[in-house]
């Protein structure tokens, strides 16, 4: 409990509040993309993702205080619904090459998915937001600890990979994303 008393104010710090605000904005935006085109989603995320990364990198290093991890709120159904919505908007622009090893690229080259990475990031950030909004300071504290650990190990890397893929889609000479959106419009008519 001594750790919690010493670090109690950290959960209300500017760094944590700014991160929580950016994470909340990301989650709310993705939840509202049903009627937004794929290209518009990517344009917004191109600006929002670097801010989330910056804010994540500034989170304070904490130690957990609870014995049990915080409850996960994003279900498999929620994740799948988010993924399918994004995938339908991105179409053939969804896959992108990822190198996971800085050694021999052939050892660590695989195909990533913009929609899958965005959905994974959503899951971690949404779980954080729900725990952080609980008002229980121990839960909030551990939410900050957990989201930072996941940032360092998982979603921080995914965010950087997907940001590169978004850049490639937005600045490529290929009009595939516009074609995907035209096909969606044709199907709804």
Image (cartoon, helix red, strand yellow):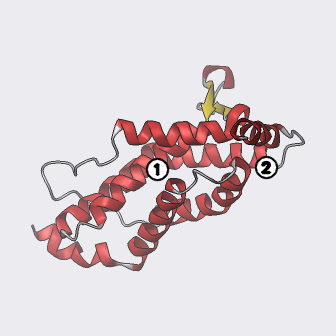
For label 2, count other residues whose C-alpha is less than 10 Å away and answer few (under 14), some (14-19) or many (20+): some
Marking on residue 122? 1
For label 1, count other residues whose C-alpha is less than 10 Å away and answer few (under 14), some (14-19) or many (20+): many
Tags 2 and 1 touching, CB below 8 Å: no
**Residue that protrudes farthest toward the front in the picture:** 189
Residue 98 occupies which quadrant of the picture? top right
Identity of the residue drawn at 59% across and 58% down:
49
Residue annotated with mark 2: 170
Q: Secondary structure at mark 2?
A: helix
Disc with the residue nearer the chain's start (2 vs 1): 1
Identity of the residue drawn at 15% across and 48% down:
68
Apparent side of residue 111 relative to residue 60 in the rendered image (left or right): right
Identity of the residue drawn at 60% across and 34% down:
113
User: Above or below — where is 91 with respect to 38?
Assistant: above
Of residue 159 and residue 119, the one placed in the foreground of this image is: 119
Identity of the residue drawn at 69% across and 34% down:
91
Residue 173 occupies which quadrant of the picture? top right
Apparent side of residue 64 relative to residue 146 in the rendered image (left or right): left
User: Above or below — where is 44 with respect to 86?
Assistant: below
Apparent side of residue 28 relative to residue 12 in the rendered image (left or right): right
The C terminus: image quadrant: top right
The N terminus: image quadrant: bottom left
Q: Label 2 vs label 1: CA separation? A: 21 Å
Point out residue 108 in the picture as x, y percentages from the top left corner: 60, 25
Point out residue 56 in the picture as x, y percentages from the top left corner: 47, 61
């Amino acid at each position: 409990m001594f750790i919690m008393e010493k670090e109690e104010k950290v959960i209300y710090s500017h760094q944590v509040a700014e991160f929580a605000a950016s994470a909340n904005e990301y989650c709310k935006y993705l939840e509202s993309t049903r009627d937004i085109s794929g290209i518009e989603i990517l344009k917004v995320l191109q600006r929002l993702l670097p801010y989330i990364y910056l804010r994540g990198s500034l989170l304070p290093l904490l130690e957990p205080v609870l014995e049990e991890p915080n409850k996960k709120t994003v279900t498999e159904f929620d994740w799948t619904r988010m993924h399918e919505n994004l995938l339908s908007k991105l179409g053939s622009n969804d896959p992108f090459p990822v190198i996971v090893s800085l050694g021999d690229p052939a050892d660590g080259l695989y195909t990533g998915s913009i929609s899958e990475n965005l959905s994974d990031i959503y899951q971690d950030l949404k779980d954080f937001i729900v725990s952080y909004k609980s008002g229980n300071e121990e839960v909030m504290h551990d939410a900050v600890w957990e989201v930072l650990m996941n940032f360092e190990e998982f979603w921080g890397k995914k965010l950087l990979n997907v940001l590169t893929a978004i850049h490639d889609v937005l600045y490529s000479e290929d009009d595939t994303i516009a074609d995907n959106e035209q096909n969606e419009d044709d199907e709804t008519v």
